[in-house]
Image: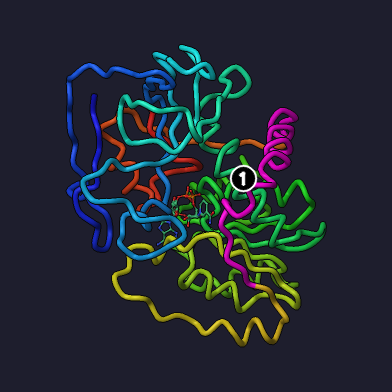
Amino acid sequence: NKTILLNNRPEGKPTVSNFEFLTDNTEIEIKKGEILLETAYVSVDPYLRGRMSAAKSYVPSFELNKPVQSGVIAKVIASKNENFKEGDFVSGMLNWQTQQVSNGEGLLKVDGSKAPLSTYLGVLGMTGLTAYLGLNQIGKPVAGETIVVSGAAGAVGSIVGQIAKIMGLNVIGIAGTDEKIAMLKTKFGFDAGINYNTSKDINADIKKLAPNGVDIYFDNVGGPISDAVFFNINRFARIIICGAISVYNETELPTSLSVQPFLVKNSALMQGFIVSNYADKFPEAMKQLSTWLLEGKLTYTETIIDGFDNIPNAFIDLFEGKNKGKMIVKI
Ligand code: NDP
């Protein structure tokens, strides 16, 4: 059995040396009420960077020399718990471990015959819920409006753009490579895209693509990309602050545009979003996302990395933009 522990806290960009691999060959016994799980898929997510630091946040920091945890899909390989049988697949917050014992608390059964198991970490998991609820609860989209999505080719962004298209919006995505921009338009139906790495002036590019201004900004990245969007917001614009990956590895808080004048001038709303605050809306959101998937209105892409030992690298690669859609490690 292999485990990945957080060995020391990253300073700046995470590296493999922040993690420690342990191997333990003793056979795992389970007691009454417990199940033995074998990991099948591991989700790596930008927010884990926050949990690796000691700073106080909305989820507690990981403890040093303890297993790292994230969203995992696992197979029940032995059960002494009447709610689970051998062969069931479950999803939950679990350790970066090839096998582990659980009492079943907090685990959801998932059905691989209804949708590929990995999708319960992506479009039918936290990612899809974040896209759907962030956009609807804070963005309140109206057909005909214009939305800009940053981190557009990633797990959350690619779903946000598609939902906005379903709702009749004009959708502009911002991402890091020409290949990603092409994918936004051909695979996900975005109307336009901006490559922030090659754009000479993101603000001017947005003006060109959205001459009537931006009504909703779904922000996954923060930093200068977001500053460029703020210059283009309309009266009563809604700004969903979902994430700020461009600053997660900064050791000093970056200085950026003073956003208040833009908000005041436009009576705009800017609100931080955390998906777990909307748990009461998960069933409704899941129902809608699965329906759209079945109807072919929604699609997704995944970057699947093979092998347990590659989990830390897959996580680190998120900060290099190596993924398209949801980054997942298959064990
Ligand atoms: P993604 O799949 O979008 O992966 C991260 C992407 O971010 C990369 O592919 C890369 O794409 C982009 N990126 C990396 N570094 C930078 C940078 N310096 N500037 C701009 N873009 C960068 O991850 P998720 O979809 O899982 O998450 C997206 C955001 O949403 C994150 O900020 C995350 O923390 C947040 N989130 C928040 C939740 C909540 O409840 N609040 C829940 C889930 C996610 P590129 O090539 O385009 O640079």
Residue toward you, 38 or 150 = 38
Classify mark 1: residues with Cα within 10 Å, few (<14), some (14-19) or many (20+).
many
Is 286 included in the stretch rendered in magenta? Answer: yes
The way the protein has been coloured in the rendering is rainbow
Measuring 65% from the left and 70% from the top, which residue is drawn there? 208
The image quadrant that residue 267 belongs to is bottom right
In the depicted structure, whether residue 161 falls above or below residue 69? below
Q: Is residue 110 left or right of residue 142?
A: left
Measuring 46% from the left and 71% from the top, which residue is drawn there? 223
Position of residue 63 measured from the top left corner of the image (x, y, whole percent): 28, 51
Pointer 1 residue: 129
Residue toward you, 211 or 38 = 38
Magenta residue span:
270-296
Measuring 52% from the left and 25% from the top, which residue is drawn there? 117
Position of residue 197 measured from the top left corner of the image (x, y, whole percent): 43, 62
Is 114 included in the stretch rendered in magenta? Answer: no
The type of residue carrying mark 1 is Leu
Q: Is residue 64 left or right of residue 266?
A: left
In the depicted structure, whether residue 133 falls above or below residue 312? below
The image quadrant that residue 298 belongs to is top right
